[in-house]
Image: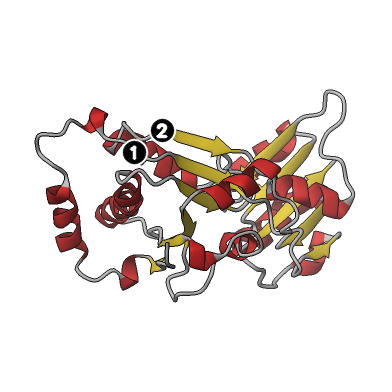
Amino acid sequence: MGNNEVEGLEQAAGAEEWFLDLEEELPAEEEPGLLTVGTLYGVGVGPGDPELITVKACRLLKECPVIAYPAARKGGKSYAHEIVDMYVDAEQKTMLGLVFPMTKDPVQLENGWRWTVELCWNELRHGNDVAFVTEGDPNLYSTFIHLARLMQELHPVVPVVSVPGISSVLGAAAALEQPLADGDQRVGIIPATDDREALKEALLQHDTVVFLKVAKVLDTVLDVLEELGLAGKASVVTKVTSPYETVWRDARELRGRELEYLSLMVVSK
């Protein structure tokens, strides 16, 4: 099979016409349940280090004829795509780049997500297994969660299987050489927001808190930590386990600075 790069919504001309043609290609007299369809796999490829990928994930990447991945809108490769390149020959695969809608507009969200599902379905309905690769784990704050849910809603005949991966949370613990929990200690994995009360509650209710995607609200989180007397117990890691990993053991050094999107904070009491 030749290389078939599809770099997402921007490069797919005539999306609506393609969608209609796709539906017309299905024989009207054929029941969906009688179709031989492929399996949709959500494959976690780890937080960044190409060696932090499971044997099962590696096997599926080599066996599946189609590999779907989150594609950058400007045509660049995703983090997950770079990891996949270490294990498969893209020229021997159909590489399906999916651009996920980054908007709050409900109409654009619905159309964008439906489009990504149909791109996968166009392969699955021909019996091709599709491995959707995601950084970290496919069931922890991953785009695969919504993709799988919508696929099961629109095309329930498709088997959906997830393959666990090492998350950035565990990668950060290793980078900091800092246990996340011991004994009866409690851990919270929280998307960082500008809701100060929610931040306080998370910090008060857990022994260790990992704030994901902390870059945009870093100063707000630092303010709350100062208020609770915990600022000296916070560390930040960006692009964990990758060749670009950076560690700040004292998060206070970062006040007022811009961080990479793939940044998280670990607060351990």
Q: CA distance from mark 1 to mark 2?
A: 8 Å
Whole-percent x, y for residue 37 in the image: 34, 38
Whether residue 26 is situated above or below residue 253 in the rendered picture: above
* Residue drawn at 53 percent across, 70 percent down: 77
Write down the residue under mark 2.
Answer: 159
Horizontal side of 17 relative to 187 (left or right) equals left
Q: Residue at x 41, y 45 (%)?
A: 147
Q: Is residue 120 above or below residue 201?
A: below
Q: Are marks 1 and 2 in contact (CB under 8 Å)?
A: yes
- Could you classify mark 2 by the number of other residues whose Cα lies within 10 Å: few (under 14), some (14-19), or many (20 or more)? some
Q: Is residue 268 left or right of residue 64?
A: right
Which of these two is toward me, 170 or 191? 170
- Going by the numbered disc 2, the residue's amino acid type is Pro
* Residue 241 seen in render: yes
Q: Residue furthest front?
A: 1
Task: Give the residue at x 62% y 46%.
Answer: 59
Residue 194 located left or right of residue 99: right
- Please state which of residues 88 and 253 is positioned toward the viewer in this rendering: 88
Please identify, in this view, whether the residue under mark 1 or under mark 2 is nearer the observer. 1
- The quarter holding residue 158 reads top left
User: Which residue is label 1 attached to?
Assistant: 37
In the image, farthest residue toward the right: 177
At label 1, which amino acid type do we have?
Answer: Val
Looking at the picture, how far across and down is residue 168, in whole percent? Answer: 70, 50
Query: What x and y, as percent, mark residue 267?
Result: 79, 47
